Amino acid sequence: MEGPTTKLAEVISTRISHDLIGNIGAIGNAVELLEEGDMDFLSDIKNILKISSSVLSNRLKFFRMAFGLENSNIEDAIQVEKVSQAYIKTIGSGEGNGISLRMSLENKAYNREAMLTVMILVDTIIKGGEIEIISTAKELTARVSSQRGLSEEKINTLEKIWQGEVPDNKAIYAGGLYLYELGREKGHHITQSQEKGFTIRIE
């Protein structure tokens, strides 16, 4: 029988698969070109393999820490920030995507939540923005601002998720749905506001 845990696993698996399949396909295409033996495209093939393998590696590391079983890396604030920074560089046009991240993680109990908010806030950005995530002994505050605007649809949907509603296009909101379930398990209260951008607060 399917329960909430099974449904959530399906949502997360779908989102991760969606975020990896494009670069897996690019590597497959590059391998086909190599097999054809046309050396005119060798430099292009090398570039495709380099970029796609980097994206896959960085996204897999991020997903492993954000959604996987507990491990020593999730307790290390330096590793959490390093992996989150690398994940952001895989979004859009990579390092030139105009998204910056600043983290100040004092309470390791919020580290997984910090990574999930990175994913959630990146998804609200239309083009370019600044993300700041701070955890203290009692709460985590995650804020995003963007001069080019944020997605009102996604922000409104997230507010409904914190109230226990499940959106139709669930896979897009895998990070938010998982964050909500974690909050319920830990007894955390999740709120959001739209002052100076968009802010998620967990306490």
Image (spheres, rainbow, N blue to C red):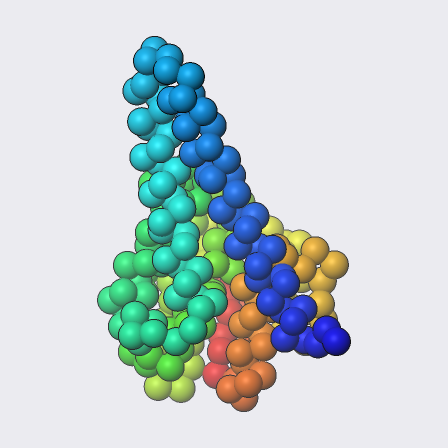
Q: Is residue 161 visible?
A: no
User: In the image, is 189 to the left or to the right of 10?
Assistant: left
Above/below status of 104 relative to 131: below
Residue under the point 30% across and 70% down: 73
User: In the image, is 68 to the left or to the right of 153?
Assistant: left
Q: Quadrant of the N terminus?
A: bottom right
Above/below status of 176 relative to 89: below
Q: Nearer the viewer, residue 161 or 143?
A: 161
- Rendered location of residue 158, percent (x, y): 62, 65
Above/below status of 156 relative to 2: above
- Rendered location of residue 83, percent (x, y): 32, 58
- Rendered location of residue 94, percent (x, y): 38, 40
Q: Is residue 68 visible?
A: yes
Residue under the point 54% across and 80% down: 183
Residue under the point 36% across and 41% down: 53
**Farthest residue toward the left?**
78
